[in-house]
Amino acid sequence: MRGPYTPMADTQRLRPNARARAAALREKERKREARRRLLIAVTAVVAVVAVIGVLVGIRLAGNDKKSAPSASASSLDPAIAAKVTAVPAATLDAVGQGGVKTLPKAVSGSPLVAGSKPKVIYIGADYCPFCAAERWPVVVALSRFGTWKNLSATTSAAAPEAYPNTPTFSFHGASYSSPYVAFEGTETNTNKRAGNGYEALDKPTAEQQQVLQKYQPDGTIPFVDFGNRYVTSGASFSPQVLGGKSMTQIATDLSNPTSDVAKGVGGTANAMTAVICQLTKNQPSAVCSSQAVAALRGKIGG
């Protein structure tokens, strides 16, 4: 039987309900606070990702800037590029060794490779007239094994340098692709004066510095290492051969086997082709079995 009504009795019955409501409110507030903290954390993460994205974008933009032609170079005329990268095989065979007396020298060392492909390393500088001469046959020879992109046009430094303003290419910012061989070209300086020297451009990699120090400790450039099996240092023919000519005239003369340009550039390119064929195990066969390449391979040996 229910007892008499008293205010105290009602209050006792209501207290548990009040506590429950208070607990529910506290739980609701706790969840709201948890959601607020989660939102703050997510916002912070998004902000960090955005900052990283900006930094990566800046770095990528910096890399693109490095791959652009240097201030001392300009875009290469496509007509010149077409002539230099497609010198007729019959012309190169007719040139043979040409007037070249300095052939690549056989060396021994750990193979230079990029993945599964042998690697050719070139180290030079835009201001150097001997580098200016040697780049022509490097471009011609490697064109027989693959494809160039973004070659730029430049000249060696002005007087009082020897053979001033020799027309040439720059490998800074250029790329090369081939199924047979890899290529790395480094131009350490531009042709623009800076103090007692020239403006800095590319920094050789540790590997490039190592092979240069090993085979050319006095730092003579141009220096070309063919897979650590052959090297050349200095120009293989005199830059004087190119003196007084425009890039268009030089590119045109490459197709005339009796010209001094073809004898210097083409003869050196044949010698370089012969040693690259040694690296690629005579691939492609159409190039490596050519008359001039076969004859020079016998002279170079190694």
Image (spheres, rainbow, N blue to C red):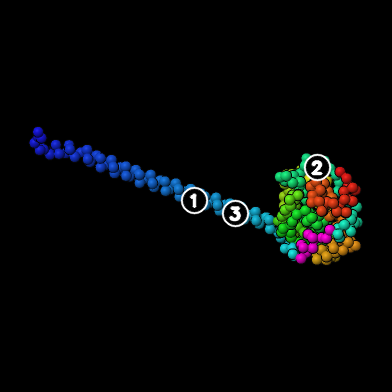
Name the residue beneath numbered marker 3: 58
Q: Position of residue 12 (x, y in %)?
A: 17, 37
Q: For mark 3, does the 10 Å Cα neighbourhood hold few (<14), some (14 to 19), or many (20 or more) residues?
A: few
Secondary structure predominantly adopted by residues drawn in magenta? helix
Q: Position of residue 95 (x, y in %)?
A: 89, 58
Circle nearer the N terminus (3, 1): 1
Above or below for 82 versus 228: below
Name the residue beneath numbered marker 1: 47
Q: Is the residue under label 2 in contact with that under label 3 (CB below 8 Å)?
A: no
What is the distance, in whole Å, between disc 3 and disc 2 at their CAs? 37 Å
| Residue 97, image quadrant | bottom right
Q: Position of residue 150 (x, y in %)?
A: 71, 59
Q: Position of residue 264 (x, y in %)?
A: 87, 58
Q: Please give the range of residues in magenta.
A: 79-89
Quadrant where the N terminus sits is: top left
Instruction: Tell me if residue 85 is in the magenta stretch.
Output: yes
Q: Is residue 276 visible?
A: no
Circle nearer the N terminus (1, 2): 1
Three-letter amino acid code of the residue under disc 3: Ile
Residue at point 35%, 44% (across, down): 31
Three-letter amino acid code of the residue under disc 2: Lys
What is the distance, in whole Å, between disc 1 and disc 2 at their CAs? 49 Å
Quadrant where the C terminus sits is: top right
Name the residue beneath numbered marker 2: 214
Residue at point 8%, 36% (across, down): 4
Task: Pick whichever, 105 or 266, lies toward us.
Answer: 266
Circle nearer the N terminus (3, 2): 3
What is the distance, in whole Å, between disc 3 and disc 1 at their CAs? 17 Å
